[in-house]
Amino acid sequence: MSWNEDQEWEREWHGNCINSINEELKQLVYAKRMGLKMTHNNKTPYIFDLGGKSVLDVGGGAYSLLLKCVNFKRATVVDPCSYPSWIYQRYDAGSIESVVSSGEDLLKRELGIYDEVWFYNVLQHTKKPEKIIKNILASGKIVRMFEWIETGVAKGHPINLTKNNLDLWLKGVGKVEQLNEGGCVGLCYYGIFKGNHYDEI
């Protein structure tokens, strides 16, 4: 399949994006592994307080984790798929910038440097994961990530990720875990890594 066909498959998978509970429950599992801690604001326990940081979510799709975040300096979600217009209105209402772009073209967008860059369940949907990670590292101080590995290649999933290639591309060592939790089943890789601008913290 071509890159465009893979993106269309992904868009069709999410459909009208109305019922997102399955994806959002899985995101809570990802967030825990990425070192994000939930707080309670007396209305909901599903809040991440970013402490005034700026965060870039690469590949966050229609329901980025940023929608559950408060107290941020700047929040941006970048994703190549086009979603229903209400998705972008929701981001606008949450003061979250949304940019329709691929991770491969991230640096061309000249979004600047963020305190943190997040990506989760993204790279197996792409053609050039090494380039995307290179762009991500160049965009932030800290990188938090979660990916499925050893999944094989299938429609909409043209890349088979491994621990070895992720360690190499991220210039670090991630953790590997077999999951069966919150709708997440499979072998995963996750961690917190230094971005190219880590020394600016």
Image: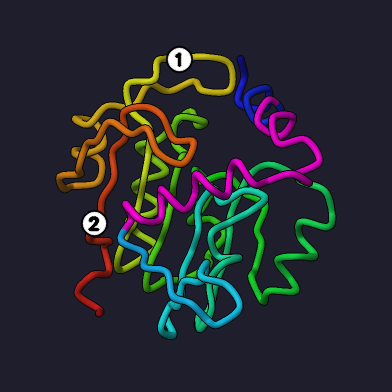
Q: Does the magenta portion include 13?
A: yes
Q: Relative to the observer, which residue lies in front, 105 or 167?
A: 167
Q: Is residue 10 magenta?
A: yes
Q: In which quadrant will I find the C terminus? A: bottom left
Percent position (x, y) of residue 177? 24, 35
Q: Residue placed farthest to the left in the image?
A: 173
Q: Position of residue 181 (x, y in %)?
A: 40, 38
Q: Quadrant of the N terminus?
A: top right
Instruction: Give residue 118's quadrant in the image.
Output: bottom left
The secondary structure that dominates the magenta segment is helix
Q: Is residue 156 above or below residue 35?
A: above
**Region of the chain picked out in magenta, as a range:** 9-34
Instruction: Residue 29 in the image: state x and y as whole percent.
Output: 41, 48
Q: Residue at x 66, y 62 (%)?
A: 98
Q: Which residue is mark 1?
A: 153
Label annotation for residue 193: 2
Give the residue displayed 58% in from the left and 56% down from the top.
Answer: 64
Asked which secondary structure carries label 1, the reply is: loop
Q: Nearer the viewer, residue 23 or 58?
A: 23
- Is residue 172 or residue 152 the one in the foreground? 152
